[in-house]
């Protein structure tokens, strides 16, 4: 499901409930202002924000996680970065694997990308297992690659290319 401004309340509630799960791996938007800026960024050319959802027992859609395809570069490169995280209560249920698989399919078939790259902190074993299960391969290691929670953190570089 494509992210939009109407998701603000359930998104922020899910982020609040997921603080312990997310630290130190990711710092999602946690205020209405941060969420509005995030939605605006995801709606610009070269970015795509997606929500992983599950239909609850009452038929209401529940936010299970997020998949972002960002910094798309077309031309001879046709590549983008991939970021994702589950919300608390939905981890280790296969929902993110399903959502990530659908996002990869969207990237290659609809967005016409050739390559997706995911950069993951080495200690994030759940995330590493997820990309591995979705067909990504490790390409390298980037020391102090990304600043998260005020600290520069090392990342493993994983990628998948379109089967064309």
Image (cartoon, helix red, strand yellow):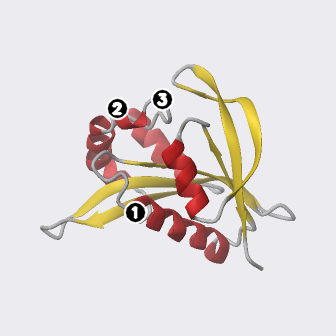
Determine whether, in the image, residue 52 is placed left or right of residue 6.
right
In front here: 107 or 46? 107
Q: For the point 30% across and 65% down, which residue is it?
A: 54
For label 2, the crowd category at 10 Å Cα-Cα, with few meaning under 14, some 14 to 19 and many 20 or more, is few
What numbered label is drawn on residue 24?
Answer: 3
Extreme residue toward the right, this view: 76
Q: Position of residue 14 (x, y in %)?
A: 29, 44
Could you tell which of marks 2 and 1 lies nearer the N-terminus? 2
Instruction: Locate the N terminus and report the quarter of the image it occupies.
Output: bottom left
**Image quadrant where residue 59 sits:** bottom left
Q: Relative to 141, does residue 161 appear above or below in the rendering?
A: below
Q: Which residue is mark 2?
A: 20
Q: Compared to 58, does 142 lie above or below?
A: above
Tell me the CA gap for discs 2 and 3: 8 Å
**Lateral position of residue 78 relative to residue 7, left or right:** right
Could one spot residue 64 in this view of the protein?
yes
Q: Residue at x 75, y 68 (%)?
A: 114
Q: Secondary structure at mark 1?
A: loop
How far apart are the two marked residues, 1 and 3, measured between alpha carbons? Answer: 22 Å
Which quarter shows the C terminus?
Answer: bottom right
The local crowd at label 3, few if under 14, some if 14 to 19, many if 20 or more residues have their Cα within 10 Å, is some
| Vertical position of residue 142 compared to residue 157: above or below | above
Please say if the residues under marks 1 and 3 sit with CB atoms less than 8 Å apart. no
The front one of 17 and 131 is 131
Q: In 3D space, how far apart are the residues under numbered discs 2 and 1 (Cα atoms)? A: 20 Å
Q: Say which label, 1 or 3, has the lower sequence index.
A: 3
Q: Nearer the viewer, mark 1 or mark 3?
A: 1
**Rendered location of residue 83, percent (x, y):** 56, 49
């Amino acid at each position: 499901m494509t992210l939009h401004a109407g998701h603000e309340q359930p998104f922020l509630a899910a982020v609040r409930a997921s603080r312990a799960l997310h630290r130190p791996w990711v710092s999602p938007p946690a205020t209405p202002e941060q969420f509005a800026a995030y939605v605006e960024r995801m709606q610009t050319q070269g970015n795509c924000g997606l929500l992983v959802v599950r239909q609850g027992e009452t038929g209401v859609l529940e936010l299970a996680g997020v998949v972002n395809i960002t910094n798309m570069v077309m031309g001879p490169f046709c590549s983008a970065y991939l970021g994702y995280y589950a919300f608390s209560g939905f981890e280790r249920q296969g929902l993110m694997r399903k959502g990530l698989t659908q996002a990869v399919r969207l990237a290659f078939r609809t967005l016409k990308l050739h390559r997706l790259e995911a950069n993951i902190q080495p200690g994030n074993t759940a995330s590493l297992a997820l990309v591995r299960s979705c067909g990504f391969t490790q390409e390298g290691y980037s020391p102090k690659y990304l600043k998260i929670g005020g600290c520069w953190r090392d990342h493993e570089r994983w990628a998948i290319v379109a089967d064309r």
